[in-house]
Image (cartoon, helix red, strand yellow):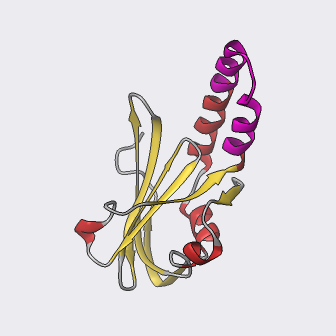
């Protein structure tokens, strides 16, 4: 399991927590600039959601109307590896920064491969409704 640190204060984080998931689908794709990106979209009991994981950052969007998801997205959490790497980069020479960046790209590739919706449910404190539909077969197959 990947370690994450929630970026929001407790009050703001609580507005996205403790939901019941009815269905979820995963899509992964490669962006030419940002690398591999994973997106989980689905339905909660009374809302729709979209969760994006890219470069160690989890962005969450929840809205009562499906076409509004992603209009107001919130950076919810950052991976501990991203936080550690950002500390190492501070004050480093450009050569060391380049090496750290390359090392971090390998870490993010591994995290992208390991990340599951169960990890997201854990940090969001979400649960499945009985009979929930979960499809993490990756629609694009990347």
Q: Looking at this view, is 125 or 101 the one in front?
A: 101
Count of numbered badges drawn on the protein:
0
Residue at the spot x=39%, y=34% of the render?
A: 31
> Viewed as shown, does residue 97 lie left or right of 42?
right
Seen from the viewer's position, the closer of residues 98 and 47 is 98
Q: Is residue 137 left or right of residue 7?
A: left
Q: How far across and how far down the image is residue 59, in percent?
A: 48, 57
User: Does residue 89 belong to the magenta stretch?
Assistant: yes
x then y, percent, for residue 101: 64, 25
Residue in the picture at 46% in, 58% down: 136
Q: Magenta residues, as a range?
A: 81-102
Rendered location of residue 106, percent (x, y): 64, 30
Quarter of the picture containing the C terminus is: top left
Is 107 on the left or on the right of 41, as rendered? right
Residue 88: where, in percent of width, then height? 76, 32
Question: Eyeballing the image, is 17 above or below 118?
Answer: below
Residue projecting furthest to the left: 67
Residue 30: quarter of image: top left
Q: Is residue 9 above or below residue 105?
A: below
Please, what is the dominant secondary structure of the magenta stretch? helix
Residue 60: within the magenta? no
Instruction: From the viewer's side, name the closer residue of 46 and 71.
Output: 71
Residue that appears at 56% across and 44% down: 112
Which residue sits furthest top? 95
Name the side, left or right, on which 44 lies relative to 114.
Answer: left
Identify the residue at image location x=57%, y=78%: 14
Q: Quadrant of the N terminus?
A: bottom right
């Amino acid at each position: 399991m990947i370690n994450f640190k929630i970026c929001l204060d407790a009050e703001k984080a609580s507005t996205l927590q403790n939901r019941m998931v009815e269905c979820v689908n995963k899509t992964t794709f490669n962006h030419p600039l940002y690398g591999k990106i994973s997106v989980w979209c689905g339905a909660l009991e009374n809302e729709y959601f979209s969760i994006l994981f890219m470069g160690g950052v989890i962005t969450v969007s929840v809205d009562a109307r499906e076409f509004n998801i992603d209009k107001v997205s919130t950076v919810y959490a950052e991976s501990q590896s991203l936080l550690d790497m950002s500390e190492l980069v501070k004050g480093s020479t450009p050569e060391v920064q380049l090496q750290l960046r390359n090392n971090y790209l390998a870490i993010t590739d591994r995290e992208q491969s390991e990340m599951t919706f169960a990890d997201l449910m854990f940090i969001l404190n979400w649960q499945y409704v009985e009979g929930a539909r979960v499809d993490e077969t990756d629609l694009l197959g990347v």
